């Protein structure tokens, strides 16, 4: 297989529908489609035009189609692209695909159209990754975040950051190579330290912002824990607005985890109702309790439910001790009953009072989640952010090299040693946008794409 091959794939979901799109890209795209098209001579038509006709196999018409011709370089792949809009039946779409393969096109690999767009300089690596994020978006917020990256905001930020580094590195090089010249700007430790501190601050802010958005992008994994009969399952049902979990007055009704997802303020909230945590001799219930405790370290958000009409018991205290370092939301549930437990009795940052008897009973909990994860800010701002773990890992490595350079400056290390750390930062940030890359990285990255993209 070669990047010079003309590739073809079905770009719409295969199944019954009004329209399917078969996409062809490469130097022979127009001539291959022209060989099976009854209509205008596609080799002579203007770019970015649509043409009516039939796809034919010999004398047999396979389908009535509209064919779009787009000539390089003003296309997604910067190659000639032809898109065949045919009727959306499985048999029809596959017959057109098979005919194109027969005429010399090659079946595209997963993500190969986007890979070619990257290799041909149409987009950078962050934009390529955002294409898949946009396809996989489940909420309006994740769609907006993906579109921001697709528009190139992260590339612009990284390029600006690297340009600042490039200027510093150039000054260092001149000072090292031409120390005898008096008319060049002398690079002092103080000047370098000021620049490095500013860059470190900017990169740290980018990482922090991005970590917050990663939770939003991937969905907030939320566990609801507490001892039996405090109202965990009722809270889950209120969030989901369905009777997902069984609710009874019998302790230990929930013995395994119960899961559900909702779109909450534009964010996916993945809720897990856990087995009531208490000392028990029941083997099945004990397994459920162990599962509940194991989820504590895996959750983005822990909601601890307490019965506000009762004083804390030993099981409550055990749970609170388990989550004290996890920044949980403490829910004082059943506030429609006489209160024996108040916020003053607890030393946690996030405490709300709720009940599940009214429609607005858990509104305070919903608002606290919005505040904790700054959901309104994330929805409204258009800040640049790192979109995935690959980008975050590289940014953290770059930050560490910046901090190493700062330490070397503090210790008055030779400037050429400091230069090594700064060059490493420059290279690592280039890896984020794809200024340098390995074939293995590209193969792994684009393998997760759908074939038609």
Image: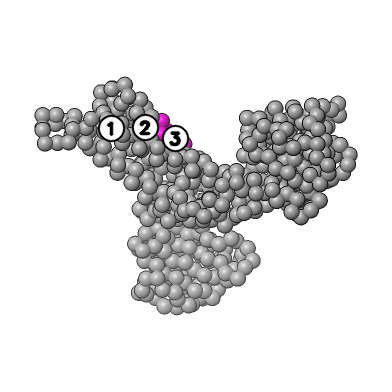
Viewed as shown, does residue 341 lie left or right of 190?
right
Q: Which x, y percent locates residue 275?
A: 78, 36
Upstream in sequence: badge 2 or badge 1: 1
At x 38%, y 47%, the residue is: 157
**x, y percent for residue 161:** 34, 43
Please, is residue 421 above or below residue 248 in the view? Answer: above
Category of crowding for the residue at label 1, using alpha-carbon neighbours closer than 10 angstroms: few (below 14), some (14–19), many (at least 20): some
Res. 394 image quadrant: top left
Magenta span: chief secondary structure: helix
Residue that mark 2 sits on:
402
Q: Check if mark 2's residue and mark 1's residue have beta carbons within 8 Å.
A: no
- The magenta stretch spans which residues? 393-402
- Which of the colour schemes (rainbow, by chain, secondary structure, one colour) is used? one colour
Q: Is residue 406 above or below residue 233?
A: above
Of residues 31 and 305, the one nearer the viewer is 305
State the separation of the CA atoms marked 2 and 1: 11 Å
Rendering coords of residue 134 (x, y %):
52, 55
Q: What is the x, y in percent for residue 126?
A: 43, 48
Spatial CA span between label 1 and label 3: 21 Å
Q: Residue sitting at 56 percent across and 52 percent down? A: 376
How many marks do you count on the picture? 3
Disc 3 target residue: 396
Q: Residue at x 45, y 50 (%)?
A: 383
Q: Which residue corresponds to mark 1?
A: 192
Which of the pair 7/168 is nearer the observer? 168
Secondary structure found at label 1: helix
Along the polypeptide, which appears first: circle 1 or circle 3? 1
Between disc 3 and disc 2, whose residue precedes? Answer: 3
């Amino acid at each position: 297989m070669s990047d010079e091959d003309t590739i073809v794939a079905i770009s719409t979901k295969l199944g019954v529908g009004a329209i399917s799109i078969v996409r062809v890209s490469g130097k022979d795209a127009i001539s291959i489609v022209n060989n099976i098209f009854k209509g205008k001579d596609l080799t002579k038509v203007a770019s970015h035009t649509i043409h009516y006709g039939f796809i034919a196999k010999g004398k047999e018409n396979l389908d009535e189609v509209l064919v779009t011709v787009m000539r390089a370089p003003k296309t997604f792949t910067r190659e000639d692209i032809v898109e065949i809009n045919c009727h959306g039946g499985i048999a029809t779409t596959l017959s057109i695909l098979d005919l194109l393969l027969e005429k010399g096109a090659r079946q595209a690999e997963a993500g190969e159209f986007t890979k070619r767009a990257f290799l041909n300089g149409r987009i950078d690596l962050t934009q390529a990754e955002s294409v898949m994020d946009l396809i996989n978006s489940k909420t309006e917020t994740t769609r907006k975040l993906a579109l921001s990256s697709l528009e190139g905001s992260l590339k612009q930020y990284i390029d600006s950051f690297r340009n600042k580094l490039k200027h510093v590195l150039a000054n260092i090089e001149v000072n090292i190579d031409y120390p005898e010249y008096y008319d060049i700007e002398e690079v002092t430790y103080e000047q370098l330290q000021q620049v490095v501190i500013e860059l470190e601050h900017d990169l740290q802010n980018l990482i922090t912002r991005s970590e917050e958005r990663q939770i939003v992008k991937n969905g907030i994994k939320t566990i609801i824990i507490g001892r039996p009969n405090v109202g965990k399952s009722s809270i889950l049902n209120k969030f989901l607005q369905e009777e997902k979990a069984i609710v009874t007055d019998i302790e230990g009704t929930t013995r395994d985890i119960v899961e559900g997802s909702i779109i909450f303020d534009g964010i996916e909230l993945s809720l897990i109702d856990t087995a009531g945590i208490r000392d028990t001799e029941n083997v099945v219930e004990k397994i459920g309790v162990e599962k509940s405790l194991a989820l504590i370290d895996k959750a983005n958000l822990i909601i601890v439910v307490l019965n506000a009409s009762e004083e804390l018991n030993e099981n409550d205290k055990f749970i609170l001790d388990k989550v004290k370092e996890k920044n949980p939301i403490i829910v004082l549930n059943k506030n429609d009953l006489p209160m024996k437990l108040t916020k003053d009795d607890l030393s946690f940052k996030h405490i709300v009072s709720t009940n599940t008897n009214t429609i607005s009973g858990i509104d305070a909990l919903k608002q606290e989640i919005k505040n904790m994860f700054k959901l309104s800010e994330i929805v409204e701002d258009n800040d640049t952010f790192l979109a995935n773990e690959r980008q975050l890992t590289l940014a953290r490595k770059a930050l560490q090299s910046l901090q190493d350079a700062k330490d070397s400056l503090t210790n008055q290390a030779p400037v050429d040693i400091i230069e090594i750390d700064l060059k490493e930062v420059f290279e690592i940030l280039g890896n984020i946008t794809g200024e340098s890359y390995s074939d293995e990285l590209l193969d792994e990255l684009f393998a997760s794409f759908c074939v038609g993209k």
